[in-house]
Amino acid sequence: MAATVASSQLPPGGGLNPLQAQGLLQASHSHHQQQQQQQQHHQMDNGEGTFDLASRKLALSDFQKVRTLGTGTFARVVLVRPAHGTEEERSRVYALKILRKTEVIKLKQIDHVRHERRILSDVSGHPFITSFVASFSDHNFLYLLLDYIPGGELFTYLRKYRRFDEDMARFYAAEIVLVLEYLHEQQGGIAYRDMKPENLLLDAEGHIKLVDFGFAKRLGNNDDEHAVETYTLCGTPEYLAPEVIHNKGHTTAVDWWALGILIYEFLTGYPPFWHSNPIEIYKQIVEKPVVFPHDPPTSPAAQDIIRQLCTVDRSRRLGNISGGAARVKAHPFFNGVDWDAMIQRRQHGPIIPPVRYPGDAQCFDIYPEEDATHDEYTDDMAARYDEYFQDF
Ligand SMILES: Nc1ncnc2c1ncn2[C@@H]1O[C@H](COP(=O)(O)OP(=O)(O)OP(=O)(O)O)[C@@H](O)[C@H]1O
């Protein structure tokens, strides 16, 4: 699985300096007292009544762990159910993203985690973005409570099918275009910055749900390029735009580049730039054009949209040029797409995940369950860092 890399803030022109983040975080059943929490008013109604989380002060002990769903570079995500409440309330399931405070500090991810918490709650409710439910923290950990997306990662289906046909690729690409249009244009310039098949989950109806806003950043108005540039090297090597590698500052344009890489990967089964050594991938991205294999053949429209999205000069890159997302939607690759029907989820996705009941986790790989109970976050750290974790 492609790992996300991140560096601390780098000065412009500082060259390539990726920090290969190490160490998977471990979840804990720590019973330390909760400290602060902030919750969005979130009322779920799944047809069986409502469970109002806003009326509760949350702690880890309010949840029962079912199993681990995934481990990323910075977090462990666990399927949970409420530990108390009515039978109906206890039948609900959520995904709990658990971040160890000491790792967040060590890997210089404090700002990223704060952006993630804030942006997730701002964009929650979009049909193709995972909904944020609440956040809370205790002595050692930060927690993000999210809607559980039961279909698993698009990555898993892509490996199973080897590649998607053009209709399937078009469907997923169209839903991603709608997400990017929303983040970039309707949410005032949020760059997602980590688009890859592992961060695209499928819901029970086969629609995309974007997860992991750990690198998302609110950059402001795209018309003023200087106001929106950011210099953090983050993302996953295969999907990084050339300007990120050159560390020249980057904008929401990086997401359009990544969409081009994704469409290529959907259609051929692998990304256009690949090597076991990330440095070689970076070299290919900045030096080589996208080359299409003879087998499987890709249509001229597919090749054209990929080339236009993967344009090294971002001032000429589709999605970033005038017209923005509307120009992407008007590209011949998307001919026949009913964009209104898409955003209203009128049609099911091309793959319906085999989800048998709401808490079914069979679409996720099995991960070793690890419970760490020892204290790591010292009083000294608390004095220095607690104010940064106040939003949780
Ligand atoms: N809401 C959810 N419902 C179901 N599974 C989820 C949910 N959120 C995350 N996951 C699973 O957990 C995995 C890791 O989550 P996430 O990508 O947020 O962690 P991360 O540590 O930030 O990852 P990365 O290394 O990509 O930065 C996801 O790839 C997905 O498989």
Image: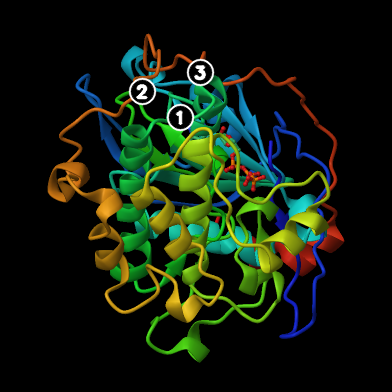
Of the residues shown, which amino acid type is indicated by label 3? Cys
Of the residues shown, which amino acid type is indicated by label 1? Tyr
Q: Is residue 45 left or right of residue 371?
A: left
Q: Is residue 110 left or right of residue 170?
A: right
Ligand number 1: quarter of image? top right
Res 363 label? 3
Dot 2 alpha-carbon crowd within 10 angstroms: few under 14, some 14 to 19, many 20 or more: some
Q: Is label 3 within 8 A of ligand 1 (CB to nearest ligand atom)?
A: no
In the figure, 11 relative to 47: above or below?
below
Residue 339 in view here: yes
The picture places residue 142, in percent across and down from the top left corner, at: 63, 48
The numbered mark, 2 or 3, whose residue comes first in the sequence reads: 2
Q: Secondary structure at mark 1?
A: strand
Between 217 and 54, the one lying in front of the other is 217
* Coloration of the structure image: rainbow
User: How many numbered callouts?
Assistant: 3
Dot 3 alpha-carbon crowd within 10 angstroms: few under 14, some 14 to 19, many 20 or more: some
Q: Is label 1 within 8 A of ligand 1 (CB to nearest ligand atom)?
A: yes
Q: Which residue is mark 2?
A: 351
Q: Secondary structure at mark 3?
A: loop
- State how far apart marks 1 and 2 are (Cα): 23 Å
Circle 1 or circle 3, nearest the eye: 3
Q: Residue at x 69, y 50 (%)?
A: 4
Between 335 and 342, the one lying in front of the other is 335
Q: Which residue is mark 1?
A: 94
Circle 1 or circle 2, nearest the eye: 2
In this view, the residue farthest toward the front is 294
- State how far apart marks 2 and 3 are (Cα): 12 Å
Q: Is residue 26 left or right of residue 60?
A: right
Of the residues shown, which amino acid type is indicated by label 2? Ile
* Image quadrant occupied by the N terminus: top right
